[in-house]
Image: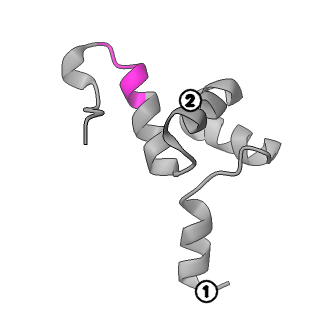
Amino acid sequence: MPQNQASSQAESIDVSSTRAVEDLARRFDATPEQIREAVKAVGSRVADVELHLKGTRSASNEQRVDSSP
């Protein structure tokens, strides 16, 4: 598989794939439901899902991810 094809597949998540959701949940120490909710909120890009999860689980405002563009 070419490098760019593999990386493009890794950049987004297919929430219809139970295995993909569970793998990402383990990776981000979240539940599958939290992954699905994050995808609904920010889209399927893995980086955006990660930032969303980090922002919603931050202990303080200083640790929160700025959600404004």
- The amino acid type, in three-letter code, at marker 2 is Asp
Q: Which residue is mark 2?
A: 29
Q: Which disc is residue 21 wearing?
A: none
Tell me the element at label 1: loop
Residue nearest the observer in this picture, 41 or 24: 41
Tell me the element at label 2: loop
Other-residue count near label 2 (Cα within 10 Å), few / some / many at <14 / 14–19 / ≥20: few
Q: Quadrant of the C terminus?
A: top left
- The amino acid type, in three-letter code, at marker 1 is Pro
Query: Could you give the CA–CA distance between mark 2 and mark 1, rounded to whole angstroms?
Result: 29 Å
Side of 41 where 19 appears, left or right: right
Q: Residue at x 40, y 29 (%)?
A: 54
Q: Position of residue 37 (x, y in %)?
A: 61, 28
Up-down relation of residue 17 to residue 10 (above or below): above
- How many labels, in total? 2
Q: Residue at x 54, y 70 (%)?
A: 7
Up-down relation of residue 16 to residue 60 (above or below): below
Q: Position of residue 51 (x, y in %)?
A: 40, 38
The earlier-in-sequence mark between 2 and 1 is 1
Residue that extends furthest to the left in the rendered view of this protein? 62
Q: Quadrant of the N terminus?
A: bottom right
Residue 26 shown in magenta: no
Q: Which mark lies nearer to you, 2 or 1?
A: 1
Q: Which residue is mark 1?
A: 2
Q: Position of residue 62 (x, y in %)?
A: 18, 21
Side of 38 where 36 appears, left or right: right
Residue 55 shown in magenta: yes
Other-residue count near label 1 (Cα within 10 Å), few / some / many at <14 / 14–19 / ≥20: few
Q: Which residues are magenta?
A: 54-59
Side of 56 where 19 appears, left or right: right
Side of 65 where 17 appears, left or right: right
Toward which corner of the image does residue 34 lie, by quadrant? Answer: top right
